[in-house]
Amino acid sequence: MEGLDVDDVFHHYRLSPTEVEAVTYYLPRLLSGETLHAVDKLIHRVDITGCEPKDLAARYAPVPQAMSSGDRFFFITCKSKNGSKLQSMRSAGGGTWSIQKTSEISHAGVKVGEVKNLSFKKKGKSTGWVMEEYRCLLQEATVFDGVKVFSKMHLAQHAPDAARQESEAYKLQQQQPEAVTPSTHAQKRPATTAAVDPQPARPKKRTCVAVPVPAPGASATPSFLMYDEAARAM
């Protein structure tokens, strides 16, 4: 549509793919590098190894229309442990992502991928943060140090207040005042204007003096003469 701002539309769009869409649409395009247009801004390509959910929540805002659930999407490499492609590392900061369940994803009776449900725990206790990790069957998803996955991190349905406060930490970053550097300050400084003489020089006057008009027949003489005061002073 003419005049349609695609980026503005996605401010009102909630990214909420189904399991089949995650492994048959989003993940293949992420692997191939194909653009997802404005949705690209909602999927973060970062190394989250060693990052706790609260660290990621402070850095990245939830996707639009999902503030209460804190949905955040990542395209990451799930790194292997001890050289095994099957066993993946799950430690993150002071806690651990614990796999709760692994399920197959089928479409039209054919397996197209799998999803792992994880819960972030500290000292064996759930923190209120959970994650769905989507894997497809494409060969290019397997890399030398692990597997490329599409993941959704969010708050559990009955997450404690502490986790919900962590999910809103991104607001503090957005409220930080813009740092003023010497260069930016110089840019905002008004241009210097030339000094103005408070008593400008007055223009020299020109005086008109009337002279008698000669009688008819006399030599031609102008009816008036212009005298310059400056010239007379010389």
Image: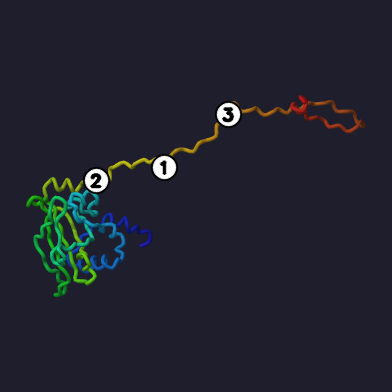
* Real-space CA distance between mark 3 and mark 1, rounded to the nearest whole angstrom: 32 Å
Q: Give above or below for 228 relative to 163.
A: above
Q: Give above or below for 109 relative to 159.
A: below
Q: Of discs 3 and 1, which sits in the foreground?
A: 1
For image coordinates 50% across by 36% down, the residue present is 192
For image coordinates 21% across by 56% down, the residue present is 48
Q: Give above or below for 31 relative to 201.
A: below
For image coordinates 10% across by 57% down, the residue present is 98
Q: Which residue is mark 3?
A: 197
Q: Amino acid at mark 1?
A: Ser
- Rendered image quadrant of residue 226: top right
Comes first in the chain, label 2 or label 1? 2
Comes first in the chain, label 3 or label 2? 2
Q: The N terminus lies in which quarter of the figure? A: bottom left
Residue 172 lies, in percent from the top left, at 24, 44
Q: Are marks 2 and 1 in contact (CB under 8 Å)?
A: no
Q: Which residue is mark 2?
A: 171
* Real-space CA distance between mark 3 and mark 2, rounded to the nearest whole angstrom: 53 Å
Q: Of discs 2 and 1, which sits in the foreground?
A: 1
Of 13 and 101, nearer the camera is: 101
